[in-house]
Image: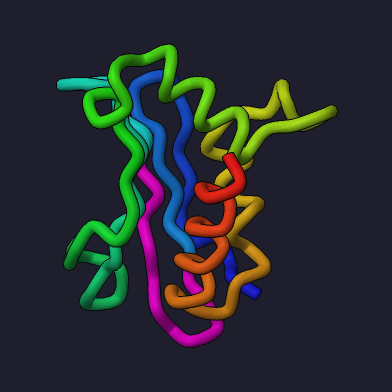
Amino acid sequence: MASVVTYKNDGTRCFCQLKFESGERVLISIAGQPYPSIKILRLALGGLLPRETIWELNSRQLGGLQPMTRKVISMFLSGPDLFVHPLDAIRDGLLPCQSIQEALKVLHEKEAQA
């Protein structure tokens, strides 16, 4: 199971760093500029440096904010979780994972089902 290393969701910053049992770390980042996007980055050097984007969902690729919002809702939010912030829903979806590879599998499955 992963653990939360850092978490910030204060209206200006929206990110969460997870550390998996494998020792690998990722940063979940939700940004509004220059266009709305969600990125998950592999971190290096104990979580200090982003190494590569391993998964991304952005409004530009999906044709706008509305299609992106529908995709995020269908992937991560349902039932009583509909009123949970997307950062919390993504974090909670990845916490059971033990590695980046397992997290990617979960993300790709959710994406295929959406």
For image coordinates 47% across by 31% down, the residue present is: 9
Residue 87 located left or right of residue 53: right
In which quadrant is the N terminus drawn?
bottom right
Above/below status of 65 relative to 88: above
Give the side of residue 61 with respect to residue 83, left or right.
Answer: left
Residue shown at the point (36%, 55%) measured from the top left? 27
Q: Is residue 24 magenta?
A: yes
Residue 19 location, x and y as percent? 48, 71
Q: Nearer the viewer, residue 25 or 57?
A: 57
Residue 31: name its quadrant.
top left
Residue 61 x, y percent position in the rendering: 25, 31
What colour scheme governs how the chains and residues are painted in the rendered image of this protein? Answer: rainbow
Quarter occupied by residue 83: top right
Between 112 and 6, the one lying in front of the other is: 112
| Quadrant of the image occupied by residue 74 | top right
Q: How many marks?
A: 0
Residue occupying image coordinates x 32% and y 27%: 62
Using the image, determine if residue 6 lies above or below residue 69: below
Q: Is 75 part of what is drawn in magenta? A: no
Left or right of residue 8, residue 35 in this image: left
Residue at coordinates 46% horizontally, 53% vertically from top-left? Answer: 6
Q: Which residues are magenta?
A: 19-29
| Residue reaching furthest to the right | 80
Q: Residue at the far bottom: name it.
A: 22
- For the C terminus, the image quarter is top right
Q: Where residue 56 sits: x, y (%)?
A: 31, 46
Say if 20 sits above or below 5 in the image.
below
